[in-house]
Amino acid sequence: MNRELISHLAHAHHPVAAPLSDTAVARLLDRALPRGTERVLDLGCGPGEWLLRALRDRPGTRGVGVDISATALDRAASTARALGLSDRLTLHRQPAADHTAPHPYDLVLSIGATHAFGGLLPTLDALRAHLAPGGHVLLGEGYWEHPPTPGDLDTIGPLADLPTTVDQVTAAGWTPVYGHLSTREERDDYEWSWTGSLAAWALDHPDHPDGAEALATATAHRAEWLGGYRATWGFATLLLRRTTA
C-alpha cells in the first residue's frame, strides 16, 4: 500500500496534516496574513488545507502549493473547485526543494515538511529564498517535550527540545513573532483521527486488496504512538520574520 494512499485515507477526518485545531490554524493565518491581499507559497502542501483556508477567508489572496503526492494535489484541486477558489490557487507536483518561483511571496509555509529539505536549517534556507522583504514564514516542526526513548528516535527521528529548536531558528537569522504549541488534546485528536480513519476505511472495505495492510498499518501506528512518543513528542508552529537580510 503506497504512502500517498495511506496519507489520503488517514487524513479523511483531519485534513490539516498536522496536530493543530481549526481554531489554531485560523489564528496563525490571521497573524501571518494581516492584509488579506498577500501571495502565499506552501512547500509540502499536501492536500492544500492551509492554502485553501487562507484563500477562502481572504478574497484578495493568491496561493501556490507544491507537493510530490498526486493524490494530495488532486484532493486540493477538487476542494478548490468546490469552493470556487481554482482561479487563485496554482498547484505544482514536484519536490518542494526543487521549486523555483518567478516572484517572492509574502508568506511561505512549511508545516511538518522539513524532511523534504534535509532538516530544520536547510528548510529555513530554502524558505528564505522565496520570501519577500518584510514577509513571514510559518514553520511547523516537531520537538522533544520530554527525553525520547530509543524507540521514539527510531519512529520519529532526530529532533531537539523546544528551547534548542528556537535557539537554532534565531541563530539562523530569524525572529519568532508568534507561535503555537500543539496541546495534548490537539495531538491526541490528530493521532486518533489518523489511525481511526485508516482503520475505519479498512473495516468498511474488507474485500479491498489493501484492506488488511491498511488495518495493520493503523494498528502499528497506534501502538507506536500510545506506547511510545505520545509521552515525549511535541509540535510547534512558529511564525517567523527575518532578523537579518
Image (spheres, grey):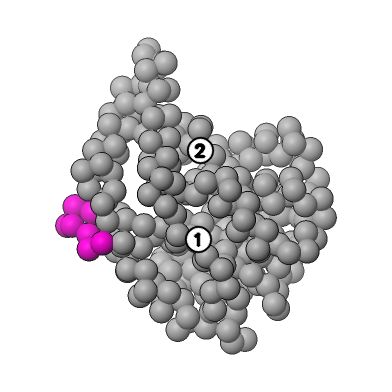
Q: Can you say which quadrant of the picture contains the N terminus?
A: top left
The stretch drawn in magenta includes residue 147: yes
Residues 210 and 138: in front is: 138
The stretch drawn in magenta includes residue 187: no
Label 1: state its secondary structure: strand
Which stretch did the figure color magenta? Answer: 146-152
Q: Percent x, y for residue 191? A: 38, 40
Residue at the location (80% across, 60% down)? 37
Q: Can you say which quadrant of the picture contains the C terminus?
A: bottom right
Q: Is residue 220 left or right of residue 165?
A: left
Spatial separation of the CA atoms under disc 2 and disc 1: 18 Å
Residue 14 is marked as 2
Reply above or below: 243 against 184. Answer: below
Q: Percent x, y for residue 67? A: 56, 50
Q: Is residue 58 left or right of residue 225?
A: right
Nearest to viewer (mark 2 / mark 1): 1
Q: Residues within 10 Å of mark 2 (few under 14, many from 20)?
A: many
Quarter residue 120 falls in: bottom left
Q: Percent x, y for residue 61? A: 77, 56
Residue at the location (56% across, 52% down)? 24
Residue carrying label 1: 180
The number of numbered badges drawn on the structure is: 2
- What is the three-letter code of the residue carrying label 1? His
- What is the three-letter code of the residue carrying label 2? His
Quarter residue 149 falls in: bottom left
Residue 98 visible somewhere in the drawing: no
Residue at the location (59% across, 87% down)? 244
Quarter residue 2 falls in: top left
Residues 103 and 34: in front is: 34
